[in-house]
Amino acid sequence: LGHEGAAVDSKLAEKGFMEFKGGETAAIERMMGWMFERDMLRVYKNTRNGMLGADYSSKFSSWLACGCLSPRTVYWSCQRYEKQRVSNKSTYWLVFEMLWRDYFRFQAARLQGKLFLPEGEGLVTQNWVEDEEGFQAWAHGRTGWPLVDANMR
C-alpha cells in the first residue's frame, strides 16, 4: 500500500503502536514471541482488553483473517504452552476465543447478506429509535462513556 519501509512515527510508538508485517513467518514469530519469549499468554485473560501497547493482547487477528496463521496452530501452541508452563484461565480463554471466532465466521457464511439487515435472520423484530443527536455524539466521540469516546476519536 505504499508504506513499505516507512519509519514509525515516534508519537505513535509512544502510544503503544505496533507495526504489523504480513506473512506466515511474521505471524509465527509474533505468536512464539508473545506466547513463549515474553510469556504474555500467562496473563492474557487479565490484559486482553487493554487499548495500548503491543503485548496486552495476542494481536493475532490480522494474521488469522488473512490465513497467515491458523487457529489450529494457535491451539496446538497453546497446548504446548500448557504442558511446558501453566494451564490457567488465560490459556483457556485464548482457545475459547479461537472457537468463538470460528463460530462467528460460520454464522457469517450461513447468514450471508442477512447478517447486515436490521432484522438479521428475521427471527426477532426490533423497533429502532432514530436519534440523530445521539448518533452524532457517538460519531464524534462525545457520548460521555470514556471507552467509547476514546475509540471514536
Image (cartoon, rainbow, N blue to C red):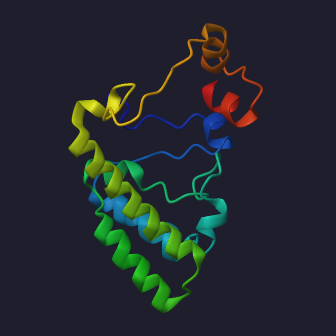
Residue 151 placement, left or right of 67: right
Q: Is residue 11 left or right of residue 36?
A: right
How many labels sit on residues?
Answer: 0
Residue at figure coordinates x 38%, y 77% from the top left: 77
Question: Which residue is rendered at x = 26% and y = 51% of the image?
Answer: 106
> At which x and y percent is residue 89?
59, 75
Determine if residue 39 is in view: no
Quadrant the C terminus occupies: top right
Q: Nearer the viewer, residue 69 or 22?
A: 69
73 is higher (above) or lower (below) than 119? below
Q: Position of residue 15 (x, y in %)?
A: 67, 41
Residue reaching furthest to the top: 132
Q: Residue 17: horizontal and vertical position, in percent?
A: 58, 43
Establish if 38 lies above or below 126.
below
Image quarter for residue 40? Answer: bottom right
Quarter in which the N terminus is drawn? top left
